Amino acid sequence: MTTTPIVPELPDTKGLQRLDTAHYLHPFTDHAALAQKGARVMVRGDGIYLWDSDGRKALDAMSGLWCVNVGYGRRSITEAVARQMDTLPFYNSFFNTTTIPAVQLAAKLAKIAPAGFNHVFFTGSGSEANDTNVRMVRRYWDLAGQPERTVIISRHNAYHGSTMAGASLGGMSGMHVQGGLPIPGIVHIEQPHYADYGAGMTPEEFGIHAAGWLEERIRELGPDKVAAFIGEPVQGAGGVIIPPSTYWPEIRRICDKYDVLLIADEVITGFGRLGTWFASDLYGMRPDLITFAKGVTSGYVPLGGVLVGDRVADLLIKGGDFNHGFTYSGHPVACAAALENIRILEEEGLVDRVAHDTGPYLQQRFGSLAAHPLVGTADSLGFVAGLTLVRRKAANVHQQVRFDPALGAGMLCRAHMFDNGVIMRAVGDRMIIAPPLVMTRDQVDEMIQKIRFCLDLTLADAMERGWLS
Ligand SMILES: *Cc1c(COP(=O)(O)O)cnc(C)c1O
């Protein structure tokens, strides 16, 4: 099939920016600051590249927002979506009805999910999926005859979305201070962040230690009060924090011991990002519920959901009405996009490629950035990676000296990346990437070269401003 790329005429950037400032409230944005600069208007994507309204090209090392796993410009997804829209653009699943794409996707997900997952509940986003988790685990314990089990334990610096329950499950203090969060019944333990909390321990010792915080909290609350523990296998928005290998198996052991359900939020880690269909497989988590969104459609159309393990599904199904759902649960167009997206991942062997070829290559190339004078650590797993900007390097991560957060070293570095054609994200002074899974080895080289160049620019700024002395 030949495809003619659609290259729109360049629009009037200034005019769009004026309208944007006048009318558009963006997510997680300081609007006064944005109005000063004007938003960058993205107009086109192809593969791993984006073009803005001034015709500037950028390598998108963030896959949009962790989601465009198969890359931009996939005509077959467009066509699958168009076909479904022509045939049946919408129908619900409320009235003892269903649609063909929703059934097919549910069955497909049951095939690629870890063992013991045979059911799915569809939502429109990752946040709604985590709201669903809260309602579902509480319903489960009601049906199991233990209605006092209502508390859900999560972690500081976790990200689980931005609805009331999603933001409450998340551990972002900046979100909690706005709007009276977290809602009751959700508590947090510390994150398994070796660089921050693991001084004096090996990573493996620290993994066991950090999991122990869960056991402590369960005992404090009383095991008969705790419904579930939720965590991202690898923390994404918190700064690509990869836990020690001992952490998740120990968490699983503790959940088993106290009969607490385990929820893996795989909104980022699902659909190949770590070189497996789900990170739960990689880490031996054996969760009871799995949250997904983002990569399920590569972001082409919004879709999320919960993969429901047999333990919860069996009781839920026996229990009669579960009074929960969304107009767009199982939206046929979104499900059609997901089916085609998964077909592409399979046909092109992208999950294996990340596991055995481009993932290890990225690890080696990204890891080489650790030699840069400004970089403390640079680590990756599959197709997520993060590096920490430091004021003074040291072989031992606990002896490195970080920048005063008020200096905004990460944002300065990110601005250089943006200006020089590579899109990276800054979380404090941690610079993170999650590239499209279609990225080739040559493109990894191109990305690393650009990152290194921008690190040099940041280093020059830091020296000029006296940050290093
Ligand atoms: C993005 C994200 C969510 C929220 O998904 P939305 O679709 O933005 O609601 C939840 N959990 C994790 C781990 C995420 O990265």
Image (cartoon, rainbow, N blue to C red):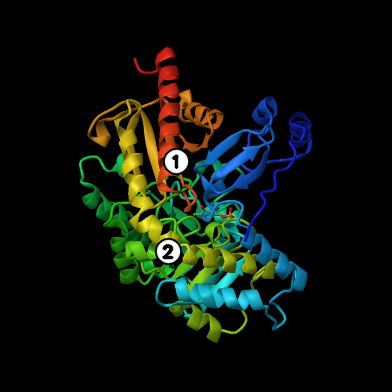
Disc 2 or 1, which lies upstream in sequence? 2
Bin the neighbour count of mark 1 within 10 Å (Cα to Cα): few under 14, some 14-19, many 20 and up.
many
Q: Is residue 6 above or below residue 341?
A: above
On the rendered structure, is 393 left or right of 343? Answer: left
Tell how many labels.
Answer: 2
Image quarter in which the C terminus is found: top left
Residue 31 figure quarter: top right
On the rendered structure, is 389 left or right of 305? Answer: left
Image quarter in which the N terminus is found: bottom right
For badge 2, the amino acid type reads Phe
On the rendered structure, is 266 left or right of 203? Answer: right
Q: Is residue 275 visible?
A: no
Find disc 1 in the rendering and name its residue: 432
Residue furthest out toward the bottom = 318
Q: Nearer the viewer, residue 178 or 354?
A: 354
Mark seen at residue 241: none
Secondary structure state at the residue bearing disc 2: loop
Secondary structure state at the residue bearing disc 1: strand
For badge 1, the amino acid type reads Ile
At horizontal 42% and vertical 18% (from top left) the residue drawn is 460
Find disc 2 in the rendering and name its residue: 278
Residue 195 in the image, given as x and y percentages of width and height = 31, 40
Quadrant of ligand 1 in image: bottom right
At horizontal 75% and vertical 73% (from top left) the residue drawn is 87
Q: Nearer the viewer, residue 200 or 328?
A: 328
Residue 355 figure quarter: bottom left
Q: Is residue 276 visible?
A: yes
Residue 382 in the image, given as x and y percentages of width and height = 38, 53
Residue 389 in the image, given as x and y percentages of width and height = 38, 30
